[in-house]
Image (cartoon, helix red, strand yellow):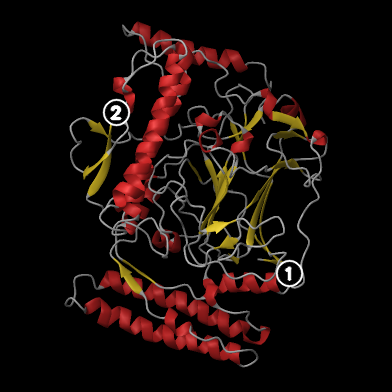
Amino acid sequence: MPGNAGKHRISRRTKIATAAIALAVAAGGIAAATTFGEPGQASADEADPALYIDILKVAPDNTAPANARGASTGTFTVDCGRNENQHFNPDNFVAQPGVRNGAQHLHDYVGNLSSNADSNNKSLEAAGTTCKNGDKSAYFWPVVRIDTGDGEKNPPAKSPDGDRDQAAQAGASPVITCPDVASKLPDVPDSAMAEVNRNLDLLDTQIDEANKRLISTRGQGGPNFVQNAILGPLKDKRVATIDRMAIAIGRTAARPQGLDTLAPCTLREQAGTGGNPASNGGGAPGGAKQQITCPDVASKLPAVPASAKAEVDRNLQLLNTQIQEANQRLADTQGQGGPNFVQNAILGPLKDKRVATIDRMAIAIGRTAARPQGLDTLAPCTLGQAAGNNGGATTAPPLPGPDANNELPENDGQIQRPAKVGITFRGSPAGKVTAMPKFLRALSGDAKPSINGTKNTRAAWTCTGFENRLTDKYPICPEGSKVERIHDFPSCWDGKNTDSANHRTHIVFPDKAGRCAAGFTAVPQLRITLVYDIPHDIQVKKQYKVDLFPSEKHNPLSDHDDFANVMSQSIMNQLVNCINRNKTCNA
């Protein structure tokens, strides 16, 4: 734990900035200010002291929905460790697939060992896991740091580029995808559970074998080779396997009907990022021949006053992120919609975002200087070939990764590994739950409320022993109590999609009574609980913070969590039946 807490916060950072300027002067020029702050601004990465609160001043909330008759009250807890293997990176394949370093803050990962910006269903399925029961799901959240200003040390950063390149290669290769069966099963009687789980595992094995055969026979046969030699036999195997499950269930309950429609599988020419709407597959990042390009804004700005620089820099970075996200959506939706789909669904919304972002920069400059005119003409973007740059148009430059000390611009300090990580799936107070589909993506919280508003933010901070007092500020806990984060995920699924354009509309939160809206089905609700050994004096001195986008200035309201379900179908079936039978299970 760092010593001399708080004694050298200003001197340390001022020395860093002063040294940088001195080097620039010695070289015969003045250094340009960085994208993320001004030289000499020692407190640029501190959290505002107003963002901390004594937990005893937070009012208790005991308004949990009452359980209706038939509520599913069981829990299923997975032990995936505490990131002892130090899996960190500033990626987010759920919210920003394909954007390397796109989070601009460091994530803690447990579960899937390969999670990175380029992760896709195929690469996630092939990876190992830290979970003791073999659950390959990805669970990740921003790291918490202690920042006393004393040059805290972290484990050396590990480059994720190897995993990223492997995942990107997997995403660019063909893959066979099949309908999820576990999520379509009725309640499985105890007497049929073992047989159903064996056959769910067999379905996963059959898909894996078919994909391996797809690779080993690449280039063989005629135009119908894959259908006749791989997809056809796979369908026959799945028909028999699914039928065995239906028979097993039918011995002591109503035999499920129509499951045979889940037997046929399809070939996707590119595995893509995964989680694409209405499928278990994905788009084709890097495979699309077209790319969205936009006029450069930075080169058209007048001199930016010092008072406006931070806001202008944040919005320039946001413009880059918007282009990256639009190009990812272009890849994910390749082949969808009519002739105006790209204009209406991607280019139009991108223009609207850029108009608002550019306008914020003009307003910021105009507060202390002449407001620049005509910048709105830079908002429209175009669709062109990936090669070439459309006569001065620009795509987003690469974002910076962590330095050797696992620090990023405006996100520094000593990383705190959670003392305890709790991953628990819970039931519904309104009734039984249905299995989640494999490769479902879900978000908790919102990483950018300063831009998106607070509609999706969630109070997630508390102290052990005070779990009914959730706050959107950093808690200061009584002696003997520990800092705690509680992230609840949405649990009402639309029954069709594993992802959606905004990564939210396919799975939403229930109402205050715990009921899902019409058209949505209750699935197990994931709760991730993180407990930290933050020394009491560090809390009182307000010297701990969570990594976030620089635009959020370490506001704990921006706390968030991400999940991708990569459980085998048999593990998911065990989970659902544990919850629906009101048991307490630990895996």
Q: Check if mark 1's residue and mark 2's residue have beta carbons within 8 Å.
A: no
In primary-sequence order, the first of circles 1 and 2 is 1
How many numbered circles does the render carry? 2
Pointer 1: what residue?
71
Q: Nearer the viewer, residue 459 or 479?
A: 459
User: The C terminus is located in which quarter?
Assistant: bottom right
Kindly identify the amino acid type of the residue bearing the numbered disc 1.
Ala
Going by the image, does 207 lie left or right of 480? left
Q: Is residue 374 above or below residue 274?
A: above
Q: Nearer the viewer, mark 1 or mark 2?
A: 2
Q: Position of residue 280 (x, y in %)?
A: 42, 65
**Which residue does the numbered mark 2 point to in the structure image?**
377
Q: Is residue 368 left or right of residue 418?
A: left
* Image position, residue 14 (x, y; %): 53, 13
- x then y, percent, for residue 389: 20, 36
Amino acid at dot 2: Thr
Q: Is residue 76 left or right of residue 130?
A: right
Residue 548 seen in the figure: yes
Q: Residue at x 77, y 47 (%)?
A: 467
